């Protein structure tokens, strides 16, 4: 057998997979959210079918689907109150399918005029929503971590242009960057990958509402300068991963200007607020950022991986990542387009933007506005119901992330971990834990457009059984 499957069989497979996926997605509420963790069964399933014999395609697909159905946390489940992993919207699933089938090569413009212009168009339109009215450049990435790595690399090359050729070792400087203790750890990873090292990240403590403390930030910058360090970048977070705090972007801009630093805003999660009429004021000042991270695979409900790096500087991506080669296609050179491979960390790259473009075509800004605003409303409803049941709330954010616990648990180190472990093991809902100012809390986050009033009421009633532990 070669790599062909005949037409008749293909038609059978299309029909089969369509039905199976529909059944899975519409019946997910009756399934466990989280699996029983059982590595031997997973291995047994995999080893049941060695590659030296071939399988009927439908049986092969069935093997995969049974593996997925039984051994996976179902982030598309309306009781998954998790880590920003959404239920993929239907348009975006079709988008990803089309991407796989047409397989556009996104390295050079001439290979993929429609896909590349389409991504650029989506970047520009999103840029306008984020307040980059006049100009917005950007690139779709695998996720927020790559977008943050892109940001740190651009910031470094902006402030120290000699780094591109001669490397960090040529610098007669000691570059450092700033973010809060609540910032995502992909910032530390970016410092590691760029060779700056994790110690070059200054984690600034937060105030009572978990925003980066602006006085400590400025004081740390001053101390660093007087100790011979060279600040080059501040990374504010708009919607922290733990508790949904939004840093004071206005003051970060002022401090960045005073010291000549690049301002990056990590809005991987919270950036979605800019698509709403009611809540976009929360990110009003994001437009002052030199660059922004936004993850479409979080609150914009498209499948992983889909991050976006956006910037208002028109040269920085080419200046940072540009490289010339002999072997890349040259046709269409006179058209004066930018080849994405000269503009990003990735080289060959899939058509990541299609799943978002198709979602926007089918649901429009309006669909996203409604879905995101509803999630926020549901978050407030969850908070109300929890308070009515005697739970204590530990965070304060407009975003649909609720960190809660019983006041009587505060003195116990492990109580929250034990409860969360029991909740997850029971399989009816998925919640995590998060430490706020030394108190462990249960964290519930709504990013599923099918988690609505009824689901929230079920979750709160299920939680009652754990209150007395
Ligand atoms: C999730 C997240 C990231 C990392 O994004 P990935 O898509 O997981 O790579 C970065 N920053 C924030 C604030 C996040 O919430």
Image (cartoon, rainbow, N blue to C red):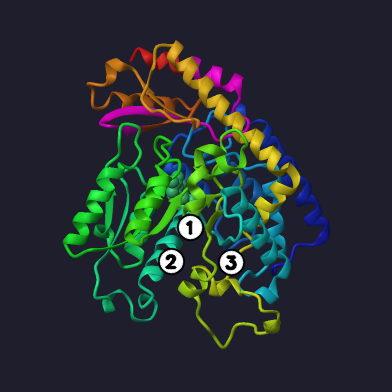
| Circle nearer the N terminus (1, 2) | 2
Question: Which of the pair 316/253 is nearer the observer?
Answer: 253
* Mark 1 touches mark 2? (CB < 8 Å): yes
* Neighbourhood count class around disc 3 (C-alpha, 10 Å): few under 14, some 14–19, many 20 upward: some
Question: Which of the pair 323/157 is nearer the observer?
Answer: 157
Which residues are drawn in magenta? Answer: 434-462
The number of callouts visible is 3
SS label for mark 3? loop
Where in the figure is residue 88, as x and y percent of width and height? 62, 43
* Neighbourhood count class around disc 2 (C-alpha, 10 Å): few under 14, some 14–19, many 20 upward: many
Name, please, the residue furthest toward the bottom.
326
| Circle nearer the N terminus (1, 3) | 1
Q: For this view, does 323 lie left or right of residue 204?
A: right
Residue depicted at x 58% and y 66%: 349
Q: For this view, does 189 lie left or right of residue 44?
A: left
Q: CA distance from mark 3 to mark 2?
A: 20 Å
Residue 291's disc number: 1
Question: Quadrant where the C terminus lies?
Answer: top left
């Amino acid at each position: 057998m070669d790599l062909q499957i005949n037409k008749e069989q293909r038609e059978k497979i299309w029909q089969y997979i369509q039905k199976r996926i529909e059944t899975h997605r519409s019946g997910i509420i009756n399934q466990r959210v989280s699996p029983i963790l059982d590595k031997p069964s997973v291995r047994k399933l995999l080893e049941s079918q060695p590659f030296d014999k071939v399988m009927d395609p439908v049986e092969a697909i069935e093997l995969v689907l049974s593996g997925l159905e039984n051994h996976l946390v179902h982030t598309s489940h309306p009781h998954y109150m998790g880590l920003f992993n959404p239920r993929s919207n239907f348009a975006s699933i079709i988008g990803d399918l089309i991407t796989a089938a047409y397989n556009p090569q996104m390295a050079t413009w001439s290979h993929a005029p429609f896909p590349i212009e389409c991504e650029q168009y989506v970047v520009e339109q999103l840029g306008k929503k984020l307040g980059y009215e006049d100009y917005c450049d950007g690139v779709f990435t695998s996720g927020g971590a790559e977008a943050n790595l892109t940001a740190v690399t651009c910031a470094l090359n902006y402030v120290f242009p000699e780094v591109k050729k001669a490397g960090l070792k040529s610098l007669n400087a000691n570059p450092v960057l700033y973010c809060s203790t609540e910032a995502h750890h992909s910032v530390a990873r970016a410092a590691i990958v760029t060779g700056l090292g994790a110690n070059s990240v200054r984690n600034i403590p937060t105030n009572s509402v978990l925003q980066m403390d602006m006085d400590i930030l400025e004081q740390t910058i001053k101390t660093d300068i007087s100790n011979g360090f060279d600040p080059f970048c501040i990374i504010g977070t708009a919607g922290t991963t733990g508790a949904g705090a939004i840093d004071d972007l206005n003051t970060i801009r002022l401090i960045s200007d005073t010291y000549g630093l690049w301002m990056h805003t990590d809005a991987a999660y919270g950036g979605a607020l800019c698509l709403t009429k009611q809540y976009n004021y929360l990110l009003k000042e994001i437009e002052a950022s030199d660059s922004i991270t936004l993850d479409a695979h979080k609150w914009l409900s498209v499948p992983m991986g889909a991050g976006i790096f956006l910037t208002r500087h028109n040269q920085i991506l080419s200046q940072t990542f540009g490289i010339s080669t002999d072997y890349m296609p040259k046709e269409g050179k006179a058209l004066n387009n930018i080849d994405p491979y000269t503009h990003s960390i990735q080289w060959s790259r899939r058509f990541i933007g299609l799943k978002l473009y198709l979602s926007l075509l089918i649901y429009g800004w309006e669909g996203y506005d409604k879905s995101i605003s509803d999630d926020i409303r549901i978050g407030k409803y969850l908070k109300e119901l929890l308070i009515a049941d005697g739970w204590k709330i530990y965070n304060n954010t407009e975003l649909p992330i609720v960190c809660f616990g019983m006041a009587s648990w505060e003195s116990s180190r492990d109580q929250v971990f034990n409860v969360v472990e029991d909740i997850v093991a029971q399989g009816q809902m998925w919640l995590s834990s998060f430490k706020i100012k030394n108190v462990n809390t249960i964290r519930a986050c709504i990013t599923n457009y099918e988690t609505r009033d009824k689901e929230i009421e079920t979750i709160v009633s299920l939680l009652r059984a754990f209150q007395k532990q």
